[in-house]
Image: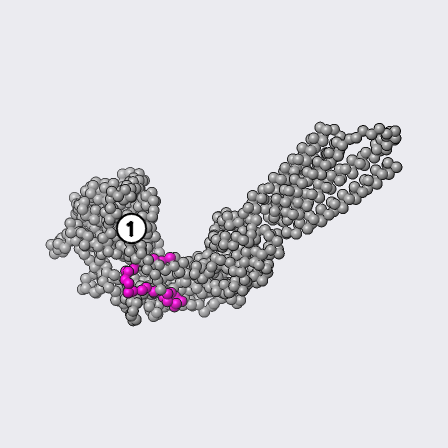
Amino acid sequence: MSLTNAAFAIAGLIAAAGPVVVHLLNRRRYRTVEWGAMAFLRKAMQRTRRAVRLRDLLLLVLRTAAVLLFGLALARPFYSEQGLQPGRLTLIALAICALFGGLIGLGLARSRGRRLSWATVSLAGIVGLLGLFASPVRESSTIVVGRSSSREPVHAIFVIDNSRSMGSRSLAGTLLDAAKQRAESALSGLPNGSRVSVLPLCGPERSYTLDAYHHTDDARAALERIDITDRSGSALGMLSLAAEAAGRVPEIPGKRVVFLGDQQATGWPANGVAEAAKTVGVPMHIVHVREANTNAERANVWIESFSVQDGVAEPEVPTTFLASVRCDGDKPVSDIDLTLDVEGSAVASQSIDLRPGQSREVVLTAAIDMEAPLGTPRFVKATLSLRTADTVANRLDRDDARFLAVPVVTEVPVVFVDEFGDDENLDAGRVGETYRLRRLLAPRPAEGVYDPLVAVRHLRLDELNEQKLEDARLVVVAGVERPTEDAVRLLRQFVEQGGPLVIAAGANFDPAVWTTNAWQNGRGILPLPLDSEPVGVRPSQAVSTSTIEPFRLDPSTLAGSYFDIAGERPEALANLWGAPFFFQAVRADASDAAMQAVVADEASRITAERAAIAAGSAVDAEVAPAWLRWKGEARSAGGDNPDAAGPEALSPEALAARSKPRVLAKFGKVDASGAALPYLVERRLGYGRVLLLTSGISSDWDTLSQTNAIVLLDRITRSLIEDGLPRRVFDAGNAVTLPVERRPDVEYQVMPPNGERQPLAVDATGRGYVVRLGDTSIAGHYDITALRGDAEGEPLERTVLAVNGRLDESNLRSLTVPQLAERAGDAEIQFVASDEAISLTGGPTGRSGLWKWAIAAVLACLLGEMFVAGHGRRDVSEVAT
């Protein structure tokens, strides 16, 4: 049992002391009367003393109980799960027994000492009840807003789940339709004068207000305006939204939160819901719109992933699109038609069959007929959609398509640095270490490719300068014997601004000089320090073949997307990466001590730089140069790397921890310490990253370029080029920021998937001008155009964004009411099943009519007191006569 207002019960306990005090005072009131007939009267009273004591005891108990019950009735008791806890009920019972047992003992006691003992027991019972009744008072400071009379108005807060999964269909319509109907039915039962808040869980923010409606007709209109979005909803998001709305109407203390949704398992985390619900401090009704627990009820087919194989496409060159399709349900689904559209035209299709629980990879190939400026990406729309003949097996339509903004590029500037540069002469045997990689990325016209992806800049290390690097998307340094300090400083600046750098051994690479000039205790460009002597013997160095001991990559150590090729079996990949032989490699110190030293030194360097900038002793442009031309484009758009945005917002420790080197591949050969030799090491520096290959590319250090495993170099370079391109694919609900050029005669507009063109405001930032898209709640393509204000026709600029819904919304499995109750813990939440009615009267949840029984008990006590008192007076009169 719990109390709506425990203060009245406490007042009743205090007032119950009155009859006890009066009883004690009456027992101490003596008068001496000299009367001759007193002896006769004393004998008569002795015969009736026991009856008088019993009468007084009954009167004391009835009067005390009447006062206590009256206070309890004013406190409006009700049943609740918290109040019905066994421990609490036991303590209340013991306190009541102590109170009335003490009163009975007090009435029967003859000596003063015994009366004092029984009074102490009764007082202990009163104190115990005071403590038990006072404990809910502290709780009521947060939940008393929900306790009100059923005739009083309430503030009803309806939170409607309009996430993607609420678009699941049945014969009765979508789940969102069912949620609206149940909310509208609950509106009719609200007391007069109630206020109503109607909040869509997934927005968009411009579609609702946190202010409450005064009339239910306005609330019904707000319900009708709620549409499905492609965002993901959660119980924690609901609680945050409800708490904000509850604070907008402080004048109405009685509040109710009603959350209507499909209660997806992915939206209810195992921990944190109970604590968040207690913080909100408002009674809640969690309404199950429709439970989907059987395989048939959650049947669905959806596209799990959709991407371009190499991250970029080339004009008029076949581009490989990779996709994954999944099925959930109770039966197989056949004839699933997949269609690939590029800029609105179908370019490829395929039909597949799926079993329940099966995920299948799909490969589609198409050439993109579109020109792109040299070195600058142009984004085109690509859509993969599916269609099933069996609609029952595919209850959710909104996840039947995924979208891409494919970067089409040609002749991306890539700088290759080796020992010869343009002085390379194949006939004279002067072949640079980057030769094989250049031929791989930019074949000659005689080899049948006329529009290569890469525009090659072949240089020596001493030819590097800012002008040669300012538009480069990638720098590869291989086979260089000794780096200069100026080149190391320049390349470090390139990486920190976002440029990717690949360093490879090979040729006359000197690890001792590289460590001295390019490591610099972690402040150079090497990810890790190198031992002074390489490991192994190259064929050109061997005195005899018996001294050559080749080694290979260990397939179990390969990590990262570079080694994971979609559609290939693990056995085939192990054979592919294990094919090349390695004869010589440099040893990188990847010990734990070296790693920790890198992190500690980087943290101290960042701290010192920030302190110097804050003190004015260093110029920001000197500490963080900004000569890379495409730096702002990649940084503002976020890039492909989520860690690449905003390192200045991180603490020195967090930024240093992010720069900790990672070993992505190791050789099977071990050194004298028993540790495997690293082959591929990656380290993040600022906005960019550095990759170190501890063996060569084209020389006799290895046979990598002579096997199919050379695809590794292709995947690394293409991935790094893609990382430098601006990000154009986002999740639904993400805020998108794009850099633009500020011109007074140009305005920017966005065309969302719904076709309603909207203007975009240009905002100034510390690094230029940007436009922001605040509402990306619908999946699809968003066209952003720059138009001249006083002219019509073709836009000056155009780009496209792709927005996709969260994959967890495609899993239609919902939690049952017992499962929801388990995750909600002891929070004040009432769970309403799909077939139960919603009651929003002002009375507290649970049985709240106990106060009527308490009043009836008060009347019974008063009637009993009148009867006992009247009967006692008649007995005394009879004795006196």
Residue 547 placement (x, y as % from top left)? 20, 43
Q: Indicate the position of residue 846 as horizontal and vertical percent values.
A: 61, 52
Residue found farthest to the bottom = 793
In the displayed structure, 56 sits above or below 741; it is: above
- Residue closest to the eye, 412 or 593: 412
Secondary structure under the numbered disc 1 in the rendered image: loop
Q: Residue at x 75, y 34 (%)?
A: 26
| Amino acid tagged 1 | Tyr
Location of residue 687 in the rendering, given as x and y in whole percent from the top left corner: 29, 50
Say which residue label 1 marks: 687
Local crowd size for mark 1, using a 10 Å CA cut-off: few (<14), some (14–19), many (≥20): many
Specify the quadrant that holds the C terminus: top right
* Residue 4 painted magenta: no
Q: Nearer the viewer, residue 695 or 515?
A: 515
Q: Residue at x 84, y 33 (%)?
A: 45
- Please name the residue shown 61% across and 47% down the image: 5
Question: What stretch of residues is rendered in magenta?
Answer: 735-758
- The answer to whether 22 is drawn above or below residue 739 in the figure is above
Picture coordinates of residue 92, whole percent (x, y): 64, 41
179 relative position to 32: left or right: left
- Residue shown at the point (34%, 70%) measured from the top left: 345
Extreme residue toward the left, this view: 428
The residue lying furthest to the front in this view is: 34
Q: Quadrant of residue 755?
A: bottom left
